[in-house]
Amino acid sequence: MIKVESALSAFGVEESPWGLEQGVGHGEFMKIFEPLPDIGRILQESKSPEEAREKLLEFVRELRWKFRSGKIEANPIDRWLAVYACDVFENILSPYSEKAAGFSTLEYLWKAAKGDEKTLSVLTKGFLEEFRHLFLAMSGKANYSKGWLGPKLEKAGIVSPDFSKVHGREAGKLRSDYLDKVYEYIKTWLNRYPSGLDERIIKKREEQRKQLQEYWGIGDEEWFDYRWQFSHVLKGRKGLETLRELNELGIVKIPEGDLAEVEKAVKYRIPWGITPYYLNLWDFEEPYKEDRHVRRQVMPPKWYMDNMILHREDREYAFDFMGEHDTSPIDLVTRRYVMIAILKAFDTCPQICVYCQRNWEVLEPFMAGSFPGWDKIEKAIEWFGERESMIDVLITGGDPFALSNKIIDKMMSRLSEFDHVINIRWGTRIPVTVPMRITEELAEILGSYIEPGKRNVAVSTHVETAYEVTPEMAKAAYNLRRQGIYIYNQLVYQRNVSRRFENVALRIALKKIGIDPYYTFYPKGKTEQRDYLVPIARVVQERKEEARLLPGQFRTDEPIFNVPRMGKNHLRAWQDRELIAIKPDGSRVYLFHPWEKGISETKLYTYTDVPIEEYLRYLESIGEKREDYETIWYYY
């Protein structure tokens, strides 16, 4: 049974939200068939979409066999891509895919090839580019075998020797010298992304911190006390006034547009808030030059605000992308998997991430009533104790490290009474937003419940960029690791941290302080978060083309898509998804196969992705070169 559901359906949006201009000329459209003119001819000569379907299927099957049988000569990698691209096109043509997508891509192609003005008027360049690249791949002429890095190395004078002509130590030295040159080239990319551990950034932030301390009239003792940080979180009207004052005093430059959106957040009670420590991670003098990623994590953009305001009355369900209402067997518990469940112990955070999964329930930092009371927590803990299947408990929220040491200790003590609980995991972003909260005392409390051979304690956090990795975070991580506590990072791969090698720089910075990459999440496909989403293809491209250059222990993260109401799908596994359609705006439509498919009968999930064309235009708008990402089209 197919579940036809679009990420736009909750908003009643019929037109694309991506802003790509609609309307293409017939001549412009027909150029997409230049790699395979027969496809255009079949579409034009067919009297109906059904006739076109049958003839196209026959053409694709013959083409694919020509590549498989060697009748068409091509580079082995481009031959593989051609066969795969033929599979993708055939899937798009299938009636099953049309039913799952809720529309026919073939019909758009057929009508446009016939010159139908109405159809041509709704198509975008994104649609054309998708099929131009698909047909190029099917023709075996995409030059995918060269990748994107190879030509750049050659242009830089770094040419791979012919290793087949040398042997032994000579070959080893030649290869080593070549790889050193490759590293030096890669380092020029990594140097674009400063770490918070770099001396230049440390010095800049020390000077900025002194300005903030003078503004608040405090010294180092207060600043490095997490209780002061908690009590001075910028939120609500007072937080907005503080930002305006810092801007007017020339301490922190903040664009008026950003302040206007925060004004809306305050007026309509949309989640917003930032800790003084995290504010100090900004570049006070040059907004959005080096600090785009940290500003955009807390400063809401216009599209986000407009949609949050539109659904402020029904947000509890409109924004519950993961369907947590339907996966909670008891208050405070969310369960999707066989041997782990979530315990939400604190329903707020010191700081609000704009792209938060739980923006339907977390209304502001430290909002009243966020602690459910011990009686409710006790009942949730008892639920875990009654189920031997619960070998892993993930305590999250909100941010549970905002709780007192006393409550944290009490929870650890109760959970440790159950022999079947092997792992107690704390999900927190406090190492990023208020790292001084990870005191030696807190670390000792957590570490005291480790029993070798019986029980482990771990922390999962969300570091988004190397720019967030600071000496303060390093100290927090060391406090935990000294107690034998493992720390894992779950990156939300949103567009502000998605440039070439940006995540590579993060992985390196994390390793410096002892945090292991764990997950790279496709950001939740929630329409109010349009300005944070990336195409699925970019997540896979990053994994294949950038992460792969790192040592294995630096790239232990797994790229993941969270299927609503069901859970995590591995994006590296082609068996977990299929490309079934292309919308007129160039959005790919995927059919996700839930992880339970080998266990029980489940519904599939249809997801409309970000148009690659729109994403590439965003990258160009912040100074990136489109050609540096050109292979993105070939990751399906």
Image (cartoon, rainbow, N blue to C red):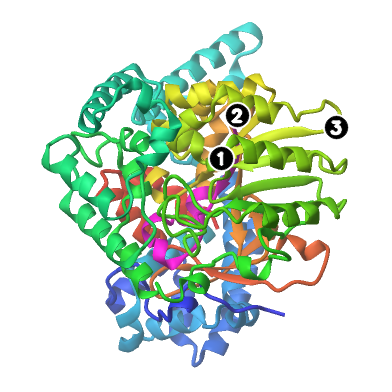
Across and down, in percent, residue 542 comes to 50, 43
Q: Residue at x 33, y 33 (%)?
A: 281
Q: Nearer the viewer, residue 153 or 63?
A: 153
The question of residue 450 being in magenta is answered with: no
Quadrant in which the C terminus is drawn: bottom right
Residue 30 as seen in the image, left or right of residue 560: left
Q: Residue 130 got which mark?
A: none
Where is residue 440 drawn, in percent x and y? Answer: 58, 22
Which quadrant of the figure contains the N terminus? bottom right
Residue range corresponding to the magenta coloring = 515-539
What amino acid does circle 1 point to?
A: Phe
Amino acid, disc 3: Lys
Q: CA distance from mark 3 to mark 1?
A: 24 Å
Q: Are marks 2 and 1 in contact (CB under 8 Å)?
A: yes
Task: From this view, report whether residue 293 is shown above or below residue 597.
Answer: above
For disc 2, the marked residue is: 442
Q: Which residue is mark 3?
A: 454
In this rendering, the answer to whether 569 lies above or below 433 is: below
Counting residues from the start of the chain, the first of labels 3 and 1 encountered is: 1
Name the secondary structure under disc 1. Answer: helix
Query: Whole-Å distance between the Cαs marked 3 and 2?
Result: 21 Å
Q: For the residue marked with disc 2, what is the amino acid? A: Leu
Q: Mark 3 against mark 2, which lies toward the viewer? A: 2
Disc ID at residue 401: 1
Question: Looking at the image, is mark 3 or mark 1 nearer the viewer?
Answer: 1
| Label 3 residue SS | loop
What is the x, y in percent for residue 576?
68, 59
Specify whether residue 534 is painted magenta. yes
Give left or right: position of 248 versus 59: left
